[in-house]
């Protein structure tokens, strides 16, 4: 996003928000920038469209496809209450991520964690 010209940046944010509204029927209120890469210009563009930037505390690194046990261990071993974990659902076969998520939820549930979507997202 940092490399886009202002019109391209604003257009991408608007098109993505519209596409997600079309899928969910709810207005989009936040944006997770690819790679978490933001600068002042990107933050202004996001705020201009009345969105909040949301980042993460834990990167599951599931995009590397290291196996579901490794993905789950990476998240569970460092999770703290209130943490946001980044996982991916695009980019090809995500069966490892899906299996890992089931393990993560089971393990953290046993530790009395509860799970929520990001507020307003």
Image (spheres, rainbow, N blue to C red):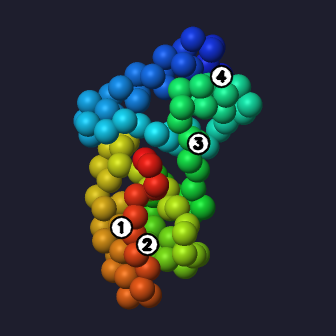
Which residue is most to the right? 40
Task: Work out whether residue 1 can be spotted.
Answer: no
Dot 3 or dot 1: first in sequence order is: 3
Query: How far apart in space, not on screen, are marks 3 and 2 (Cα)?
Result: 26 Å
Compared to residue 111, the image places residue 2 above or below, namely above
Q: Tell me the element at label 3.
A: strand
**Where does residue 23 sit, x and y in percent of width and height?**
25, 35
Residue highlighted by disc 4: 3
x, y percent for residue 11:
49, 17
Q: Distance between the residues labelled 4 and 2?
A: 33 Å
Return the x and y of residue 102 as percentages of the image width and height.
Answer: 31, 71
Q: Which mark is residue 101?
A: 1
* Mark 4 to mark 3 CA distance (whole Å): 17 Å
- Tell me the quarter of the image containing the N terminus: top right
The residue indicated by pointer 2 is 72
First of labels 2, 1 by sequence position: 2
Which of the two labelled residues, at mark 4 and mark 2, occupies the earlier sequence position? 4
Q: Is residue 103 above or below residue 51?
A: below
Query: Foreground residue, 37 or 15?
Result: 15
First in sequence: mark 4 or mark 3? 4
Q: Distance between the residues labelled 3 and 1?
A: 24 Å
- Mark with earlier residue (3, 2): 3
The residue at the point 45 percent across, 63 percent down is: 66
Q: Are marks 2 and 1 in contact (CB under 8 Å)?
A: yes
Alpha-carbon neighbours of circle 1 within 10 Å: few (<14), some, or many (≥20)?
A: some
- 28 left or right of 35? left
Mark toward the start of the polypeptide (4 vs 1): 4
**Mark 3 or mark 2: which is in front?**
3
On residue 53, the disc is 3
Say few, some or many: other residues with alpha carbon within 10 Å of mark 3 (under 14 / 14 to 19 / 20 or more).
some
Mark 3–mark 1 contact, CB under 8 Å? Answer: no
- Helix, strand or loop for disc 1: helix
């Amino acid at each position: 996003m940092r490399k886009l010209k202002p019109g391209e940046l604003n257009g991408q944010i608007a098109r993505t928000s519209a596409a997600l509204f079309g899928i969910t029927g709810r207005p989009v209120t936040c944006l997770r920038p690819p790679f978490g890469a933001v600068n002042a210009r990107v933050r202004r563009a996001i705020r201009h469209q009345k969105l909040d930037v949301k980042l993460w505390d834990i990167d599951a690194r599931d995009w590397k496809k290291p196996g579901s046990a490794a993905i789950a261990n990476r998240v569970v071993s460092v999770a703290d209450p209130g943490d946001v974990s980044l996982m991916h659902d695009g980019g090809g076969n995500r069966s490892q991520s899906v299996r890992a998520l089931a393990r993560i939820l089971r393990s953290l549930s046993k530790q009395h964690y509860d799970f929520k979507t990001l507020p307003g997202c």
